[in-house]
Amino acid sequence: MNTINKTFLVGCCLLMLVSCRALHQPVIVRNVPIETFKYAYIPTTQGLASSTGETFGGKYGIYGFSTTKSVNPSDVIAGMLITEGFIILPELKSELSHETLIVNYGESGRHNRGLGYTIEVTIQFISAETKQMVCTCTAEGQGSTEADDIRQAIRRALSSLFENK
Protein backbone atom coordinates (compact mmCIF):
# COMPACT_ATOMS: atom_id res chain seq x y z
CA MET A 1 0.00 0.00 0.00
CA ASN A 2 2.86 2.35 0.81
CA THR A 3 4.34 1.86 -2.70
CA ILE A 4 1.01 2.76 -4.33
CA ASN A 5 0.78 5.98 -2.30
CA LYS A 6 4.33 6.98 -3.20
CA THR A 7 3.73 6.26 -6.88
CA PHE A 8 0.53 8.28 -6.81
CA LEU A 9 2.29 11.19 -5.08
CA VAL A 10 5.15 11.19 -7.59
CA GLY A 11 2.63 11.08 -10.46
CA CYS A 12 0.73 14.05 -9.04
CA CYS A 13 3.93 16.04 -8.58
CA LEU A 14 5.02 15.36 -12.16
CA LEU A 15 1.60 16.37 -13.47
CA MET A 16 1.76 19.62 -11.53
CA LEU A 17 5.23 20.42 -12.84
CA VAL A 18 4.23 19.76 -16.45
CA SER A 19 1.08 21.86 -16.22
CA CYS A 20 2.68 24.87 -14.50
CA ARG A 21 4.81 26.19 -17.35
CA ALA A 22 4.78 29.97 -17.48
CA LEU A 23 3.46 31.70 -20.59
CA HIS A 24 6.12 32.69 -23.11
CA GLN A 25 7.19 36.32 -22.99
CA PRO A 26 5.55 38.48 -25.69
CA VAL A 27 7.70 39.09 -28.76
CA ILE A 28 7.79 42.61 -30.22
CA VAL A 29 9.43 43.48 -33.56
CA ARG A 30 9.66 47.22 -34.26
CA ASN A 31 10.73 48.55 -37.65
CA VAL A 32 9.37 52.10 -37.31
CA PRO A 33 8.37 53.99 -34.15
CA ILE A 34 4.65 53.48 -33.66
CA GLU A 35 4.40 56.90 -31.99
CA THR A 36 4.57 58.60 -35.41
CA PHE A 37 1.03 57.37 -36.16
CA LYS A 38 -2.24 58.86 -34.93
CA TYR A 39 -4.95 56.80 -36.63
CA ALA A 40 -5.69 53.10 -36.89
CA TYR A 41 -7.88 51.12 -39.24
CA ILE A 42 -8.84 47.65 -37.98
CA PRO A 43 -10.57 45.28 -40.42
CA THR A 44 -13.51 43.57 -38.75
CA THR A 45 -12.93 40.12 -37.33
CA GLN A 46 -15.43 37.40 -36.56
CA GLY A 47 -16.38 36.88 -32.97
CA LEU A 48 -15.68 33.65 -31.16
CA ALA A 49 -17.98 32.09 -28.59
CA SER A 50 -16.74 29.32 -26.33
CA SER A 51 -18.13 27.62 -23.30
CA THR A 52 -17.10 25.49 -20.38
CA GLY A 53 -19.25 23.39 -18.13
CA GLU A 54 -19.41 20.68 -15.57
CA THR A 55 -21.89 18.04 -14.51
CA PHE A 56 -22.06 16.13 -11.29
CA GLY A 57 -24.52 13.79 -9.75
CA GLY A 58 -25.58 12.24 -6.55
CA LYS A 59 -28.36 10.12 -5.23
CA TYR A 60 -30.89 12.92 -5.86
CA GLY A 61 -30.11 13.52 -9.52
CA ILE A 62 -27.66 14.96 -12.00
CA TYR A 63 -26.78 18.64 -11.86
CA GLY A 64 -24.54 20.88 -13.88
CA PHE A 65 -23.68 24.33 -15.06
CA SER A 66 -22.08 25.95 -18.05
CA THR A 67 -20.59 29.33 -18.87
CA THR A 68 -20.46 30.82 -22.35
CA LYS A 69 -18.07 33.65 -23.18
CA SER A 70 -17.45 35.48 -26.42
CA VAL A 71 -14.79 37.76 -27.81
CA ASN A 72 -14.38 39.82 -30.97
CA PRO A 73 -10.63 40.39 -31.45
CA SER A 74 -11.04 43.66 -33.37
CA ASP A 75 -13.10 45.13 -30.50
CA VAL A 76 -10.44 44.20 -27.92
CA ILE A 77 -7.68 45.65 -30.12
CA ALA A 78 -9.70 48.83 -30.76
CA GLY A 79 -10.33 49.33 -27.06
CA MET A 80 -6.65 49.06 -26.20
CA LEU A 81 -5.56 51.35 -29.05
CA ILE A 82 -8.14 53.94 -28.00
CA THR A 83 -6.72 53.96 -24.47
CA GLU A 84 -3.28 54.58 -26.01
CA GLY A 85 -4.62 57.67 -27.82
CA PHE A 86 -5.22 56.28 -31.31
CA ILE A 87 -8.26 57.36 -33.30
CA ILE A 88 -9.99 54.36 -34.86
CA LEU A 89 -11.12 54.99 -38.44
CA PRO A 90 -14.18 53.17 -39.83
CA GLU A 91 -12.55 53.20 -43.29
CA LEU A 92 -9.20 54.08 -44.82
CA LYS A 93 -8.90 57.73 -45.85
CA SER A 94 -6.21 58.68 -48.36
CA GLU A 95 -5.69 62.14 -46.87
CA LEU A 96 -4.76 60.56 -43.51
CA SER A 97 -2.72 57.64 -44.88
CA HIS A 98 0.65 59.07 -43.75
CA GLU A 99 -0.56 58.90 -40.10
CA THR A 100 -2.66 55.71 -40.35
CA LEU A 101 -1.87 52.16 -39.31
CA ILE A 102 -3.64 49.12 -40.71
CA VAL A 103 -3.95 46.63 -37.85
CA ASN A 104 -4.28 42.93 -38.66
CA TYR A 105 -4.92 40.13 -36.20
CA GLY A 106 -4.30 36.42 -36.53
CA GLU A 107 -4.11 33.29 -34.41
CA SER A 108 -0.55 32.07 -34.84
CA GLY A 109 -0.44 28.89 -32.82
CA ARG A 110 -1.51 26.62 -29.99
CA HIS A 111 0.87 25.18 -27.47
CA ASN A 112 0.17 22.22 -25.18
CA ARG A 113 0.58 23.03 -21.53
CA GLY A 114 -0.03 19.93 -19.46
CA LEU A 115 -3.71 20.03 -18.57
CA GLY A 116 -4.64 22.47 -21.32
CA TYR A 117 -3.22 24.62 -24.08
CA THR A 118 -2.47 28.24 -24.83
CA ILE A 119 -3.52 30.22 -27.88
CA GLU A 120 -0.92 32.48 -29.48
CA VAL A 121 -1.95 35.57 -31.43
CA THR A 122 0.04 37.95 -33.62
CA ILE A 123 -0.97 41.53 -34.26
CA GLN A 124 0.55 43.26 -37.26
CA PHE A 125 0.78 47.03 -37.80
CA ILE A 126 1.24 48.22 -41.40
CA SER A 127 1.66 51.79 -42.67
CA ALA A 128 -1.38 52.72 -44.76
CA GLU A 129 0.79 54.99 -46.93
CA THR A 130 3.81 52.80 -47.68
CA LYS A 131 2.32 49.34 -46.97
CA GLN A 132 5.50 48.57 -45.02
CA MET A 133 5.57 46.67 -41.74
CA VAL A 134 5.72 49.06 -38.79
CA CYS A 135 5.76 46.42 -36.04
CA THR A 136 4.35 43.11 -34.90
CA CYS A 137 3.58 41.77 -31.46
CA THR A 138 3.01 38.14 -30.55
CA ALA A 139 1.82 36.73 -27.23
CA GLU A 140 -0.02 33.74 -25.84
CA GLY A 141 -2.85 33.50 -23.37
CA GLN A 142 -4.58 30.83 -21.35
CA GLY A 143 -7.90 31.14 -19.56
CA SER A 144 -10.90 28.99 -18.80
CA THR A 145 -12.25 29.23 -22.39
CA GLU A 146 -10.83 29.95 -25.85
CA ALA A 147 -12.42 33.41 -25.69
CA ASP A 148 -10.45 34.08 -22.50
CA ASP A 149 -7.27 32.76 -24.15
CA ILE A 150 -7.61 35.15 -27.09
CA ARG A 151 -8.55 38.16 -24.96
CA GLN A 152 -5.60 37.55 -22.64
CA ALA A 153 -3.15 37.04 -25.53
CA ILE A 154 -4.23 40.28 -27.24
CA ARG A 155 -3.91 42.25 -24.01
CA ARG A 156 -0.48 40.78 -23.24
CA ALA A 157 0.77 41.54 -26.77
CA LEU A 158 -0.43 45.14 -26.86
CA SER A 159 0.55 45.88 -23.26
CA SER A 160 4.09 44.78 -24.07
CA LEU A 161 4.13 46.90 -27.21
CA PHE A 162 3.08 50.07 -25.40
CA GLU A 163 4.92 49.61 -22.09
CA ASN A 164 8.19 50.91 -23.56
CA LYS A 165 6.76 53.64 -25.74
Image: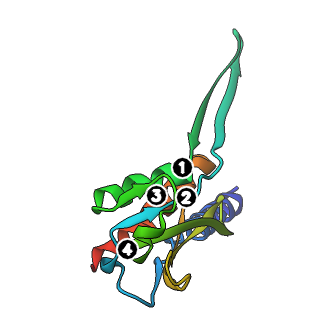
Q: CA distance from mark 4 to mark 3?
A: 18 Å
Look at the numbered discs 4 and 3 and tell me whether their residues touch, using CB distance below 8 Å: no
Q: What residue type is disc 3 on?
A: Ile
Q: Residue at x 31, y 80 (%)?
A: 36
Position of 20 relative to 61 (above/below)? below
Q: Earlier in the sequence, mark 1 or mark 3?
A: 3
Q: Secondary structure at mark 2?
A: loop
Tag shown at residue 77: 3
User: Which quadrant would the C terminus be assigned to in this image?
Assistant: bottom left
Q: Which residue is mark 4?
A: 99
Position of 161 relative to 115 (above/below)? below
Q: Quadrant of residue 163?
A: bottom left
Q: Residue at x 48, y 52 (%)?
A: 90
Q: Secondary structure at mark 1?
A: helix
Q: Which residue is mark 1?
A: 148
Residue 143 visible, this angle: no
Q: CA distance from mark 4 to mark 1?
A: 32 Å
Q: Earlier in the sequence, mark 4 or mark 3?
A: 3
Q: Quadrant of residue 5?
A: bottom right
User: Which quadrant would the N terminus be assigned to in this image?
Assistant: bottom right
Look at the numbered discs 2 and 3 and tell me whether their residues touch, using CB distance below 8 Å: no
**Camera-side residue of 114 and 102:** 102
User: x and y percent of residue 109 in the render?
Assistant: 68, 70
Q: What residue type is disc 4 on?
A: Glu
User: x and y percent of residue 20 in the render?
Assistant: 53, 67
Q: Which residue is mark 2?
A: 142
Residue 107 appears left or right of 17: right
Q: CA distance from mark 2 to mark 1?
A: 7 Å
Q: Earlier in the sequence, mark 4 or mark 1?
A: 4
Dot 3, how many residues are within 10 Å of its Cα: few (below 14), some (14-19), or many (20+)? Answer: many
Look at the numbered discs 2 and 1 and tell me whether their residues touch, using CB distance below 8 Å: yes
Q: CA distance from mark 4 to mark 2?
A: 34 Å
